[in-house]
């Protein structure tokens, strides 16, 4: 009897052949997708990358405060871990260090430059667009995902943040990733996926502390309501995710709290050298109550707190173009059908709607420090709600109610764009009429769209999308072509109106308030406006004596001359700090110019008790500080710095000299 020999197994394709098929799969996408989906997605991501990377170096150091801390972290692992403002670890920045870790690693790899600092932010912005597409596509289809990603990409404040080095780009990326992970967790009632949500929110906490937790009610509510499992399992999964959040957010806090004060830098932003105070005070409840010390201005200098703040001139053009439509579509989407408890679309509406509601109420009602660029945290929720809600109604356009709501949403968006564009009346004035005209025309046709052919319906849909996104897209392009520096940037062209600085005040592009100047000072004309603006106005009364005109000044880096930089670098190896000065911004610009540690007395605004006068005197006696920088570039003009005791002591005991407009004191040579 002859044994049967099995046929030989098919040869395994070589790795090269497998890799050769990877690119076509990437370009083709899922087999179930229409052919246009993957090219459209890749086109969206590529266009977003161009928008966010275009002429990126024009902003220089952007926020020099964080740029200097990234430079310090690239030279000292201790400074890297704590987020110190200088490599000698005198004081930390007033935020946790996660966003600095990314920049510092980039600087270590590619050297210190504007590109190495800002390219990571741009890539984070592109990543946010991609993750939002994935999250929305999972519940509403690829068309909705592309609409959400496009709306996010052209939101003016999202463009701004993705081209700047404040922590918000990483914050929004992590929270959007958490929302995507939550979508998958709700689908399968997966405790593991929900734990990943907790980890991502914990990392967001290490980026901007308590602001990251504003999304927690949204995530918890969506999972508790919609996960397809028993109530007990849902609660256990939520508790597990909470533990993951606490562990991810808490390990760094625990280390900083347990390390002796003498072995670590001072915790910037606190008055007691405590990370717990920083969490609950300056970066926490103090933002809500207004009872925080330091910073760059609190309400009412940034507009009166209230529900109308997000629609006001200072904020509306940053993020609120689609906000009314998002709210209308949220309510309609939740009520249009009687979906089962586990319906993923309704769960997504709950997620993004609660995210939007909690965050918007917080930003609107907070009485403490508030800046316009904070509102980038609203952008993913607005974009997702418009895309999901709009898709639901478009799919049901045979219903009169669905057509009516779509028409109202589009007409309202067009009229709201007319209002927002009118606040920048000198900027492309024709746009103010073109966008509403197109939107209103499309809204009228929408009422009868169910009777039209597919080609006409597609044309109406395209016109509606163009009308809804036309205004923010043009503002986004302006933002991308405008350099932004200082600590408080704003998106879009100059805006006039009741901006929170007083009637008739213009908020200049690239800053968070009027340029510095005493009461009655004329601002630069069109050719001179910082950041390429086109408005001329005057600072209102109260500007020269600590009023809102002064409190609105942006922190600008200025420039340090080669002569001053060379002088500070002399004999730098013999000292711990090449120089010291009051306030982090002045310290930052000199540190970036020299690459040497510069002590920021008093931290960001000069209001932190670090070091005390006695400690500083000891540092000088020990020869650890070479120069003291008096007046010069990078002055912290918003809060006035410390009580002047350090500067007064230096002026009394050391002789000063002026070099290129900078007053320098050689602390190694006491005055006779």
Image: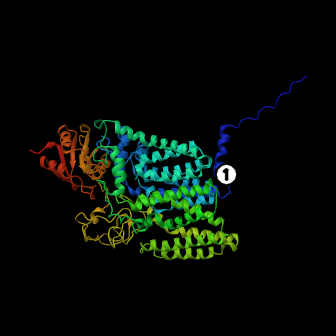
Question: Total marks drawn?
Answer: 1
Most extreme residue toward the top is 1
Residue 278: in sight, yes or no? yes
Depicted 16 relative to depicted 138: above or below: above
Q: Is residue 402 left or right of residue 73?
A: right
Q: Secondary structure at mark 1?
A: loop
Residue named by callout 1: 30
Please state the horizontal and vertical placement of residue 92, each as a whole percent of the image.
Answer: 33, 45
Quadrant in which residue 667 is drawn: top left
Q: Residues within 10 Å of mark 1 (few under 14, many from 20)?
A: few
Return the residue nearer the eye: 83 or 75. 83
Residue 76: in sight, yes or no? no
Q: Who's the residue at 54% across and 42% down the image?
A: 236
Q: Who's the residue at 41% across and 62% down the image?
A: 364
The image's colour scheme reads rainbow
Q: Who's the residue at 63% across and 75% down the image?
A: 447
Please state the horizontal and vertical placement of residue 584, each as a whole percent of the image.
Answer: 29, 50
Depicted 464 relative to depicted 598: above or below: below
Quarter containing the C terminus: top left
Please state the horizontal and vertical placement of residue 247, each as a whole percent of the image.
Answer: 45, 40
């Amino acid at each position: 009897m002859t044994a049967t020999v099995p046929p030989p197994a098919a040869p395994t394709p070589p790795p090269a052949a497998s890799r050769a098929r990877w690119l076509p799969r990437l370009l083709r996408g899922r087999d179930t997708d229409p052919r246009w989906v993957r090219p459209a997605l890749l086109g969206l991501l590529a266009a977003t990358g161009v928008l966010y990377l275009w002429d990126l170096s024009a902003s220089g150091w952007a926020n020099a405060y964080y740029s200097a801390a990234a430079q310090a972290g690239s030279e000292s692992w201790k400074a890297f871990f704590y987020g110190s403002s200088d490599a000698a670890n005198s004081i930390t920045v007033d935020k946790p260090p996660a966003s600095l870790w990314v920049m510092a690693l980039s600087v270590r790899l590619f050297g210190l430059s504007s590109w190495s600092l800002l390219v990571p932010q741009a890539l984070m912005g592109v990543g946010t667009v991609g993750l939002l597409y994935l999250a929305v596509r999972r519940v509403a289809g690829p068309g909705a995902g592309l609409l959400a990603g496009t709306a996010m990409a052209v939101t003016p404040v999202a463009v701004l943040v993705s081209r700047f080095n404040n922590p918000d780009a990483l914050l929004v990326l992590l929270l959007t990733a958490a929302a995507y992970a939550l979508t998958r967790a709700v689908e399968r009632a997966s405790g593991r996926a929900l734990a990943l949500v907790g980890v991502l929110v914990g990392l967001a906490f290490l980026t901007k502390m308590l602001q990251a937790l504003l999304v927690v009610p949204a995530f918890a509510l969506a999972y508790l309501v919609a996960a397809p499992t028993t109530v007990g399992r849902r609660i256990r999964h939520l508790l597990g995710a909470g533990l993951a959040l606490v562990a991810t957010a808490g390990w760094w806090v625990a280390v900083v709290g347990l390390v002796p004060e003498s072995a670590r830098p001072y915790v910037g932003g606190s008055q007691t050298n405590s990370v717990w105070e920083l969490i609950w005070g300056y970066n926490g409840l103090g933002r809500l109550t207004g009872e925080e010390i330091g910073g760059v201005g609190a309400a009412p200098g940034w507009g009166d707190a209230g529900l109308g703040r997000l629609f006001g001139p200072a904020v509306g053009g940053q993020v609120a173009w689609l906000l009314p439509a998002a709210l209308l579509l949220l309510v309609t989407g939740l009520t249009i059908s009687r979906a089962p408890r586990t319906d993923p679309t309704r769960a997504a509406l709950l997620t993004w709607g609660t995210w939007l509601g909690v965050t918007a109420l917080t930003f609107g009602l907070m009485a403490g420090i508030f800046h316009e660029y904070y509102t980038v945290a609203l952008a993913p929720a607005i974009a997702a709600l418009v895309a999901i809600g709009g898709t639901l109604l478009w799919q049901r356009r045979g219903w009169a109610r669905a057509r009516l709501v779509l028409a109202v949403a589009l007409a309202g968006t067009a009229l709201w764009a007319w209002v927002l564009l009118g606040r920048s009346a000198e900027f492309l004035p024709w746009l103010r009429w073109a966008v509403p005209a197109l939107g209103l025309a499309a809204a009228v046709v929408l009422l009868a769209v169910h009777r039209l052919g597919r080609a006409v319906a597609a044309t109406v849909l395209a016109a509606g999308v163009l009308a809804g996104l036309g205004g923010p897209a043009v503002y986004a392009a302006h933002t991308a072509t405008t350099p932004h520096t200082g600590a408080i940037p704003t998106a879009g062209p100059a805006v006039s109106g009741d901006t929170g600085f007083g009637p008739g005040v213009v908020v200049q592009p690239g800053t968070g308030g009027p340029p510095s100047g005493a009461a009655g000072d004329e601002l630069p004309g069109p050719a001179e406006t910082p950041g390429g603006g086109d408005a001329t106005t005057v600072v209102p009364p109260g500007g020269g004596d600590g009023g809102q005109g002064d409190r609105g000044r942006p922190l600008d880096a200025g420039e340090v001359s080669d002569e001053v930089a060379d002088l500070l670098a002399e004999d730098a190896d013999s000292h711990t700090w090449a120089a010291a000065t009051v306030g982090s911004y002045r310290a930052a610009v000199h540190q970036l110019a020299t690459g040497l540690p510069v002590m920021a007395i008093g931290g960001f605004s000069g209001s932190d008790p670090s070091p005390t006068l006695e400690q500083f005197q000891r540092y000088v006696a020990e020869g650890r500080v070479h120069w003291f920088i008096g007046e010069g570039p990078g002055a912290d003009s918003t809060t006035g710095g410390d009580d002047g005791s350090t500067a007064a002591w230096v002026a009394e005991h050391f002789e000063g000299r002026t070099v290129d407009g900078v007053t320098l004191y050689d602390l190694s040579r006491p005055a006779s």
